[in-house]
Amino acid sequence: MGMARAQHRPASRGVWGRAAGLAAAGLAIAGLLGGATAASAAGIGQPVPWQMDLQQPVTEVATEIYNFHHLLNWIMLVIVLFVLGLLIYCIVRFNERAQPTPSRTTHNTTLEVAWTIVPVLILVAIAIPSFRVLRTQLSDPRADLMVKVIGHAWYWSYEYPEDVGGFKFDANLLEGEDQVKSGQPKLLATDNEVVVPVNKIVKVQVTAADVLHSWALPSFGFKIDAIPGRLNQFWFKAEREGTYHGQCSELCGQRHAYMPITVKVVSQEAFQAWTAEAKTKFARTDGASRFADAR
Ligand SMILES: [Cu+2]
Protein backbone atom coordinates (compact mmCIF):
# COMPACT_ATOMS: atom_id res chain seq x y z
CA MET A 1 0.00 0.00 0.00
CA GLY A 2 2.77 2.41 1.05
CA MET A 3 4.63 1.52 -2.17
CA ALA A 4 1.56 2.29 -4.26
CA ARG A 5 1.18 5.77 -2.72
CA ALA A 6 4.85 6.51 -3.26
CA GLN A 7 4.45 5.60 -6.92
CA HIS A 8 1.40 7.81 -7.24
CA ARG A 9 2.95 10.99 -5.94
CA PRO A 10 5.15 11.86 -8.95
CA ALA A 11 2.17 11.15 -11.23
CA SER A 12 -0.05 13.65 -9.39
CA ARG A 13 2.72 16.27 -9.57
CA GLY A 14 2.80 15.60 -13.31
CA VAL A 15 -0.91 16.41 -13.45
CA TRP A 16 -0.26 19.74 -11.67
CA GLY A 17 2.56 20.49 -14.05
CA ARG A 18 0.23 19.85 -16.97
CA ALA A 19 -2.45 22.12 -15.42
CA ALA A 20 0.12 24.91 -15.14
CA GLY A 21 1.12 24.27 -18.76
CA LEU A 22 -2.50 24.50 -19.88
CA ALA A 23 -3.00 27.76 -17.97
CA ALA A 24 0.13 29.17 -19.61
CA ALA A 25 -1.13 28.08 -23.03
CA GLY A 26 -4.45 29.82 -22.34
CA LEU A 27 -2.67 33.03 -21.41
CA ALA A 28 -0.47 32.74 -24.51
CA ILE A 29 -3.56 32.46 -26.76
CA ALA A 30 -5.15 35.48 -25.04
CA GLY A 31 -1.89 37.40 -25.54
CA LEU A 32 -1.78 36.37 -29.19
CA LEU A 33 -5.29 37.71 -29.81
CA GLY A 34 -4.48 40.93 -27.95
CA GLY A 35 -1.28 41.30 -29.95
CA ALA A 36 -3.18 40.63 -33.16
CA THR A 37 -5.40 43.63 -32.51
CA ALA A 38 -2.38 45.82 -31.72
CA ALA A 39 -0.54 44.75 -34.87
CA SER A 40 -3.57 45.16 -37.13
CA ALA A 41 -2.58 48.70 -38.11
CA ALA A 42 0.27 47.30 -40.21
CA GLY A 43 0.44 45.42 -43.49
CA ILE A 44 -1.43 47.30 -46.22
CA GLY A 45 -0.86 45.55 -49.52
CA GLN A 46 2.17 43.67 -48.26
CA PRO A 47 3.28 41.72 -45.20
CA VAL A 48 5.41 43.38 -42.49
CA PRO A 49 7.94 41.79 -40.12
CA TRP A 50 6.32 40.25 -37.04
CA GLN A 51 2.87 40.75 -38.49
CA MET A 52 0.37 38.76 -36.40
CA ASP A 53 -2.82 39.64 -38.21
CA LEU A 54 -4.16 39.38 -41.76
CA GLN A 55 -3.22 42.14 -44.18
CA GLN A 56 -5.50 45.19 -44.08
CA PRO A 57 -8.59 44.52 -46.21
CA VAL A 58 -9.34 46.97 -49.02
CA THR A 59 -12.35 45.27 -50.63
CA GLU A 60 -15.78 44.31 -49.29
CA VAL A 61 -14.95 40.60 -49.66
CA ALA A 62 -11.65 40.98 -47.79
CA THR A 63 -13.32 42.99 -45.02
CA GLU A 64 -15.96 40.29 -44.54
CA ILE A 65 -13.28 37.56 -44.50
CA TYR A 66 -11.28 39.64 -41.99
CA ASN A 67 -14.24 40.17 -39.66
CA PHE A 68 -15.28 36.52 -39.92
CA HIS A 69 -11.74 35.44 -39.07
CA HIS A 70 -11.74 37.64 -35.95
CA LEU A 71 -15.19 36.48 -34.90
CA LEU A 72 -14.00 32.85 -35.14
CA ASN A 73 -10.91 33.66 -33.07
CA TRP A 74 -13.04 35.13 -30.27
CA ILE A 75 -15.46 32.18 -30.31
CA MET A 76 -12.47 29.86 -30.21
CA LEU A 77 -10.91 31.77 -27.30
CA VAL A 78 -14.11 31.54 -25.22
CA ILE A 79 -14.38 27.77 -25.88
CA VAL A 80 -10.70 27.16 -25.12
CA LEU A 81 -10.93 29.10 -21.84
CA PHE A 82 -14.16 27.32 -20.88
CA VAL A 83 -12.63 23.86 -21.49
CA LEU A 84 -9.45 24.93 -19.68
CA GLY A 85 -11.58 26.06 -16.71
CA LEU A 86 -13.41 22.70 -16.64
CA LEU A 87 -10.09 20.84 -16.77
CA ILE A 88 -8.62 22.87 -13.90
CA TYR A 89 -11.83 22.44 -11.87
CA CYS A 90 -11.74 18.64 -12.36
CA ILE A 91 -8.05 18.48 -11.51
CA VAL A 92 -8.49 20.47 -8.29
CA ARG A 93 -11.85 19.12 -7.18
CA PHE A 94 -11.62 15.47 -8.14
CA ASN A 95 -8.00 14.49 -7.68
CA GLU A 96 -7.12 11.46 -5.56
CA ARG A 97 -6.29 13.52 -2.44
CA ALA A 98 -9.39 15.75 -2.51
CA GLN A 99 -11.71 12.84 -3.34
CA PRO A 100 -10.29 9.62 -1.82
CA THR A 101 -13.53 7.68 -2.45
CA PRO A 102 -14.64 8.62 -5.96
CA SER A 103 -18.31 8.99 -6.77
CA ARG A 104 -19.75 6.37 -9.14
CA THR A 105 -22.08 8.85 -10.84
CA THR A 106 -22.78 8.09 -14.49
CA HIS A 107 -25.16 9.65 -17.05
CA ASN A 108 -26.89 12.99 -16.69
CA THR A 109 -29.58 13.48 -19.29
CA THR A 110 -29.83 17.26 -18.90
CA LEU A 111 -26.06 17.69 -19.28
CA GLU A 112 -25.88 15.32 -22.25
CA VAL A 113 -28.67 17.14 -24.09
CA ALA A 114 -26.99 20.48 -23.29
CA TRP A 115 -23.56 19.49 -24.56
CA THR A 116 -25.10 18.25 -27.79
CA ILE A 117 -27.35 21.25 -28.41
CA VAL A 118 -24.92 24.03 -27.42
CA PRO A 119 -22.24 23.01 -29.98
CA VAL A 120 -24.96 22.75 -32.65
CA LEU A 121 -26.09 26.29 -31.81
CA ILE A 122 -22.47 27.51 -31.94
CA LEU A 123 -22.03 25.92 -35.40
CA VAL A 124 -25.27 27.49 -36.66
CA ALA A 125 -24.11 30.87 -35.31
CA ILE A 126 -20.84 30.41 -37.21
CA ALA A 127 -22.61 29.24 -40.39
CA ILE A 128 -24.65 32.46 -40.75
CA PRO A 129 -21.72 34.91 -41.23
CA SER A 130 -19.88 32.19 -43.18
CA PHE A 131 -22.67 31.98 -45.77
CA ARG A 132 -22.86 35.77 -45.82
CA VAL A 133 -19.20 35.91 -46.95
CA LEU A 134 -19.93 33.27 -49.61
CA ARG A 135 -22.92 35.25 -50.87
CA THR A 136 -20.80 38.39 -51.27
CA GLN A 137 -18.06 36.44 -53.05
CA LEU A 138 -20.51 34.79 -55.45
CA SER A 139 -22.69 37.90 -56.01
CA ASP A 140 -21.02 38.37 -59.42
CA PRO A 141 -21.75 42.09 -59.97
CA ARG A 142 -21.59 43.71 -63.40
CA ALA A 143 -18.00 44.39 -64.43
CA ASP A 144 -16.59 47.86 -65.16
CA LEU A 145 -13.33 46.35 -66.34
CA MET A 146 -12.24 42.87 -67.38
CA VAL A 147 -8.67 41.69 -67.03
CA LYS A 148 -7.39 38.35 -68.23
CA VAL A 149 -4.65 36.67 -66.24
CA ILE A 150 -2.56 33.81 -67.58
CA GLY A 151 -0.21 31.86 -65.33
CA HIS A 152 3.06 30.68 -66.86
CA ALA A 153 5.99 28.80 -65.39
CA TRP A 154 7.10 31.16 -63.83
CA TYR A 155 5.53 34.57 -64.41
CA TRP A 156 2.11 36.05 -65.03
CA SER A 157 0.85 37.63 -68.21
CA TYR A 158 -2.08 40.01 -68.48
CA GLU A 159 -4.47 41.02 -71.24
CA TYR A 160 -6.73 44.06 -71.30
CA PRO A 161 -9.77 44.02 -73.58
CA GLU A 162 -10.37 46.16 -76.72
CA ASP A 163 -12.55 48.71 -74.90
CA VAL A 164 -9.57 49.92 -72.86
CA GLY A 165 -6.98 49.56 -75.60
CA GLY A 166 -6.46 45.84 -76.26
CA PHE A 167 -2.92 45.19 -75.06
CA LYS A 168 -1.03 42.45 -73.28
CA PHE A 169 2.14 42.24 -71.23
CA ASP A 170 4.16 39.92 -69.00
CA ALA A 171 4.96 40.63 -65.37
CA ASN A 172 8.24 39.18 -64.14
CA LEU A 173 9.82 39.23 -60.72
CA LEU A 174 11.80 42.39 -60.06
CA GLU A 175 15.26 41.34 -58.87
CA GLY A 176 18.59 42.79 -57.68
CA GLU A 177 19.31 46.47 -58.46
CA ASP A 178 15.95 47.01 -60.14
CA GLN A 179 14.09 45.90 -57.02
CA VAL A 180 16.21 48.08 -54.71
CA LYS A 181 15.66 51.10 -56.99
CA SER A 182 11.90 50.52 -57.15
CA GLY A 183 11.53 50.72 -53.36
CA GLN A 184 9.13 47.80 -53.63
CA PRO A 185 9.35 44.79 -51.30
CA LYS A 186 11.70 41.95 -52.19
CA LEU A 187 10.19 38.92 -53.95
CA LEU A 188 6.83 40.69 -54.20
CA ALA A 189 7.50 43.33 -56.87
CA THR A 190 7.12 42.87 -60.63
CA ASP A 191 8.57 44.77 -63.59
CA ASN A 192 5.13 45.52 -65.02
CA GLU A 193 2.15 46.16 -62.76
CA VAL A 194 -1.51 45.44 -63.21
CA VAL A 195 -3.22 48.84 -63.04
CA VAL A 196 -6.90 49.11 -62.17
CA PRO A 197 -9.21 52.02 -61.25
CA VAL A 198 -10.33 52.55 -57.65
CA ASN A 199 -13.95 51.83 -56.66
CA LYS A 200 -14.65 50.02 -59.93
CA ILE A 201 -15.71 46.41 -60.26
CA VAL A 202 -12.87 44.51 -61.86
CA LYS A 203 -13.53 41.01 -63.11
CA VAL A 204 -10.50 38.85 -63.45
CA GLN A 205 -10.58 35.84 -65.76
CA VAL A 206 -7.82 33.46 -64.79
CA THR A 207 -6.27 30.57 -66.67
CA ALA A 208 -2.85 28.98 -67.10
CA ALA A 209 -0.66 28.10 -70.06
CA ASP A 210 1.21 25.16 -68.58
CA VAL A 211 0.65 23.95 -65.02
CA LEU A 212 -1.63 24.88 -62.12
CA HIS A 213 -1.04 28.32 -60.59
CA SER A 214 -3.21 30.48 -58.36
CA TRP A 215 -3.70 34.24 -58.57
CA ALA A 216 -3.94 35.52 -55.01
CA LEU A 217 -3.98 38.94 -53.33
CA PRO A 218 -4.47 38.84 -49.54
CA SER A 219 -5.67 42.43 -49.08
CA PHE A 220 -8.36 41.92 -51.76
CA GLY A 221 -9.52 38.63 -50.24
CA PHE A 222 -8.84 37.26 -53.71
CA LYS A 223 -7.57 33.79 -54.56
CA ILE A 224 -8.50 31.73 -57.55
CA ASP A 225 -6.82 28.81 -59.28
CA ALA A 226 -5.27 29.22 -62.73
CA ILE A 227 -5.98 25.96 -64.52
CA PRO A 228 -4.83 25.11 -68.08
CA GLY A 229 -7.82 24.72 -70.40
CA ARG A 230 -10.24 26.25 -67.96
CA LEU A 231 -11.35 29.82 -67.33
CA ASN A 232 -11.99 30.83 -63.74
CA GLN A 233 -13.50 34.15 -62.82
CA PHE A 234 -13.63 36.24 -59.69
CA TRP A 235 -14.15 39.94 -58.98
CA PHE A 236 -12.90 42.68 -56.71
CA LYS A 237 -13.63 46.32 -56.04
CA ALA A 238 -10.63 47.98 -54.43
CA GLU A 239 -11.78 50.84 -52.21
CA ARG A 240 -8.37 52.41 -51.60
CA GLU A 241 -5.65 53.59 -53.95
CA GLY A 242 -2.25 52.00 -53.48
CA THR A 243 0.07 49.18 -54.45
CA TYR A 244 -0.94 45.68 -53.44
CA HIS A 245 1.17 42.57 -53.58
CA GLY A 246 0.28 38.92 -53.87
CA GLN A 247 1.89 35.67 -54.92
CA CYS A 248 1.18 32.54 -56.89
CA SER A 249 -0.54 30.35 -54.33
CA GLU A 250 -0.50 26.95 -55.98
CA LEU A 251 2.73 24.97 -55.73
CA CYS A 252 3.60 25.04 -59.43
CA GLY A 253 7.28 24.11 -59.64
CA GLN A 254 10.85 25.22 -59.25
CA ARG A 255 10.24 28.99 -59.33
CA HIS A 256 6.83 29.00 -57.65
CA ALA A 257 8.09 31.49 -55.06
CA TYR A 258 9.31 33.88 -57.77
CA MET A 259 6.13 34.79 -59.63
CA PRO A 260 4.64 37.59 -57.52
CA ILE A 261 1.64 39.74 -58.35
CA THR A 262 1.58 43.54 -58.12
CA VAL A 263 -1.65 45.46 -58.56
CA LYS A 264 -1.75 49.24 -58.56
CA VAL A 265 -5.08 50.80 -57.70
CA VAL A 266 -5.30 54.34 -59.10
CA SER A 267 -7.89 57.05 -59.81
CA GLN A 268 -10.02 56.81 -62.96
CA GLU A 269 -8.00 59.63 -64.62
CA ALA A 270 -4.67 57.99 -63.79
CA PHE A 271 -6.05 54.70 -65.13
CA GLN A 272 -7.01 56.34 -68.44
CA ALA A 273 -3.57 57.94 -68.70
CA TRP A 274 -1.99 54.55 -68.04
CA THR A 275 -4.07 52.72 -70.67
CA ALA A 276 -3.20 55.42 -73.22
CA GLU A 277 0.47 54.84 -72.55
CA ALA A 278 0.12 51.05 -72.27
CA LYS A 279 -1.46 50.94 -75.76
CA THR A 280 1.80 52.14 -77.28
CA LYS A 281 4.18 50.53 -74.80
CA PHE A 282 2.83 46.97 -74.81
CA ALA A 283 2.00 44.48 -77.56
CA ARG A 284 -1.43 44.88 -79.15
CA THR A 285 -3.82 41.96 -78.83
CA ASP A 286 -5.43 43.00 -82.18
CA GLY A 287 -8.66 41.38 -81.18
CA ALA A 288 -6.88 38.06 -80.64
CA SER A 289 -7.57 38.18 -76.92
CA ARG A 290 -10.93 36.71 -76.19
CA PHE A 291 -12.87 37.27 -73.03
CA ALA A 292 -15.65 35.05 -71.91
CA ASP A 293 -18.90 36.98 -72.17
CA ALA A 294 -19.62 37.17 -68.47
CA ARG A 295 -20.46 40.76 -67.72
CU1 LIG B 1 2.66 29.41 -60.08
Image (spheres, rainbow, N blue to C red):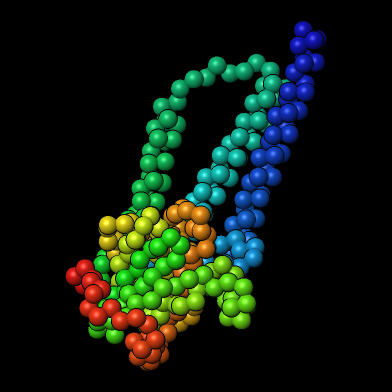
Q: Position of residue 35 (x, y in %)?
A: 63, 61
Vertical relation: 266 (above or below) 130: below
Report the image quarter containing ligand 1: bottom left
Instruction: Answer left or right for 286 relative to 255.
Output: left
Viewport quadrant of the C terminus: bottom left
Q: Position of residue 105 (x, y in %)?
A: 52, 19
- Seen at 76% across and 11% down, the residue is 4
User: Could one spot residue 16 in this view of the protein?
Assistant: yes
Asked whether the viewer can see residue 132, the reply is no
Residue 117 lies in quadrant: top left
Q: Nearer the viewer, residue 252 or 8?
A: 252
Q: Is residue 25 above or below residue 230?
A: above
Q: Residue furthest top?
A: 1
Task: Name the residue located 35 percent from the left edge and 68 percent from the top edge.
Answer: 149
| Percent position of residue 156, x then y | 41, 67
Image quadrant in which the N terminus is located: top right
